[in-house]
Image (cartoon, helix red, strand yellow):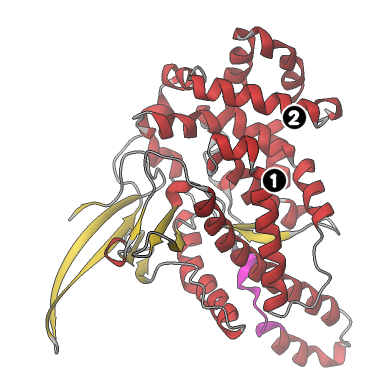
Amino acid sequence: MSPASAKGDHYASIMFRANVSYTCTGGKQSKSLIIKTMPDEEGHKKEMLSGSHLFETEIGMYTKVLPRFEQILREAGDNTRLCAPCLYCSLEPRQVMIFEDLVPLGYTVIRKREATTEELNFAFLKLAKLHAVSFHVLHEVNTRWKYLKYVHILNATFHFIFILKQPEYLQEFKNGLFEIPNMRQDPFCITGMKKFLDFLEEFPELRKYKPYFEKMENDYIDRVEIVMQEYRRNRKPNGYYVLCHGDFHLKNMMFKQREDGSLEDVMLLDYQVSNICPITMDLIYAVYMLMGIEERHNNYKELLDYYFAEFLATLQNIGYKGDLPNSVEFWQQIFQHKCYDIYLITTFLPMMNAFKHNDFDPAEVFQKEDLQRGMYRLDSYVQDVKYLLARFEAEGFFQNQ
């Protein structure tokens, strides 16, 4: 047994690598496995995640959703793999999942550098296929439900049987980031704006933005939560809803190269906060938590356009029958959900930047305010924010607040 992740890779689970030896009819064998379980040691991590649905969600994704999604792709001639093989899972007496280890298969995690444009395109391609299949399935569910509402009461028995055959399994995925019970009480998660306002005050060229952020201070988290729960509570007629990954950043994917150095595959990991919500949630998150500064400043529109083109291509390939989403509406919704940009810039981007460029311990970052405030003063974060706020201003965002 040995640790299976480096410091800073993951916070919501503990992972071990187990080299297992066994004997079967073919003789002695060995296999490397990844064992994933909930934090057991007393402290902030256990308190933060206590009572959450993280393992229920991820087990559901690996046992109910991802295999069915892969089957839909295979039936359309697409052999994309959406997940690593899950060999065992349970919730009692312990929450645990056991996976085939991807490292012996040639997959690696990117460390101490940003992802290249090619690597980002691979990641967005995989996300586009996940989103497209879920968009297709949700459309079929909603279309059939609209039809069934008109079935005559005399056909009640037929109606019941028909409903049971539909893929309603997606409806249980409703526990995203803000459904973690202690999320709205954790100081780190709710005081980012206060630290950000103090940060703006320190830089004369940024002080002009402070009044705009002060207007958002009391409700910006509420606005993000409303958007994340929109599918379940206030669905929009023109909303693009998908099963989002929920935590689409670089440490939650592993890349595989061919012998000539070209990319062969990327495997998405950690489906613990996957939930049905607007398509924008994974993409806005990716701009700040997946892309490096260079891509975020100069190439983010091209990357998201690439994603959207692959999203549409996958929909057409798997036989989607509804009206295809359009690029204009897609970008309008990204702009309409700018509250998520604000939450990420003020709260999570400083931490992600620090993890990329410094040896920070996540457990300490979540608990020590002096470390948190220090992350806002790192030069890479300062320069990033200066560029981003100037772009927001040029786009007219602040005038609409």
Q: Nearer the viewer, residue 354 or 125?
A: 125
Residue shown at 89%/88% (left/top)? 152
In this rendering, position of residue 385 left or right of residue 81: right
Q: Which residue is mark 2?
A: 392
- Position of the C terminus by quadrant: top right
Three-letter amino acid code at the position of disc 1: Lys
Number of numbered markers = 2
- The magenta segment is 163-172
* Residue 284 percent coordinates (x, y): 65, 44
Q: Secondary structure at mark 2?
A: helix
Looking at the image, residue 346 sits to the left or right of residue 96; the answer is right
Q: Decide: few, some or many residues near mark 1? Use Cα within 10 Å; few <14, some 14-19, many ≥20.
A: some
* Residue indicated by mark 1: 301
Q: Look at 58% across and 83% down and name the residue there.
A: 77
Residue 218 shows in the view: no
Task: Give the class, few, some or many, for how many residues have Cα within 10 Å of label 2's Cα (few <14, many ≥20).
Answer: few
Q: Earlier in the sequence, mark 2 or mark 1?
A: 1
Q: Residue at x 78, y 53 (%)?
A: 330
Residue at disc 1, secondary structure:
helix
Tag 2 and tag 1, C-beta contact below 8 Å: no
The CA distance from mark 2 to mark 1 is 14 Å
In percent of width and height, residue 326 lies at 82, 60
Question: Residue extending furthest front?
Answer: 260
Residue 218 position in % (x across, y down): 71, 25
Q: Main secondary structure of the magenta part?
A: helix
On screen, residue 190 versus residue 302, left or right, reads: left
- Amino acid at dot 2: Phe
In the rendered image, the vertical position of residue 155 relative to residue 121, given as above or below: below
On screen, 263 above or below 27? above
Which quadrant of the figure contains the N terminus? bottom left
| Front-most of residues 238 and 253 | 253
Answer above or below: position of 56 versus 318.
Answer: above
